[in-house]
Amino acid sequence: MTDVFAGRQSGLESPATDLYEIVPDDAADLSLWVRAITATEPGTVRVTAIGGSTATLYVGAGSVLPVRVRKVWATGTTAAGVVGLV
């Protein structure tokens, strides 16, 4: 199948081009920083943004939080099936 957008540069407002399954971890940053997160089951997600601030956010199942994230903490995260959008 042909990607008709292959010759165009994508920006932060563009749809995600890849997905990254996230395992919350108190010790390590993500190996790939993401542009947004979603979850398959609702709950809280404790994150550190790429700017360094940390907060606990609520995510509904299937909703997308448009925040650039470098870390998802195990402590404070109750949502399941957390996925990063790249």
Image (cartoon, rainbow, N blue to C red):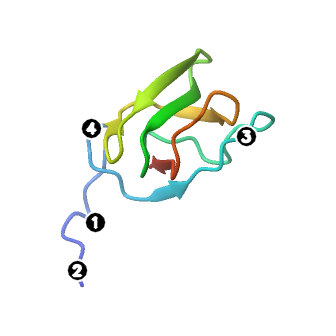
Q: Are marks 4 and 1 in contact (CB under 8 Å)?
A: no
Q: Amino acid at mark 1?
A: Ala
x then y, percent, for residue 1: 24, 85
Residue, far right: 27
**Frontmost residue, 34 versus 62:** 62
Q: Amino acid at mark 2?
A: Thr
Q: Tell me which numbered mark, 3 or 1, is placed earlier along the sequence.
A: 1
Residue, far left: 4
Query: Relative to residue 5, is residue 57 drawn left or right?
Result: right
Q: Tell me which numbered mark, 4 or 2, is placed earlier along the sequence.
A: 2
| Residue at image mark 3 | 25
Q: Nearer the viewer, mark 3 or mark 2?
A: 3
Q: Secondary structure at mark 4?
A: loop
Query: Relative to residue 73, is residue 2 drawn left or right?
Result: left
Q: Amino acid at mark 3?
A: Asp
Q: Which mark is residue 13?
A: 4
Q: Residue at x 47, y 32 (%)?
A: 68
Q: Are marks 3 and 2 in contact (CB under 8 Å)?
A: no
Q: Which mark is residue 6?
A: 1
Q: Residues within 10 Å of mark 3 (few under 14, many from 20)?
A: some
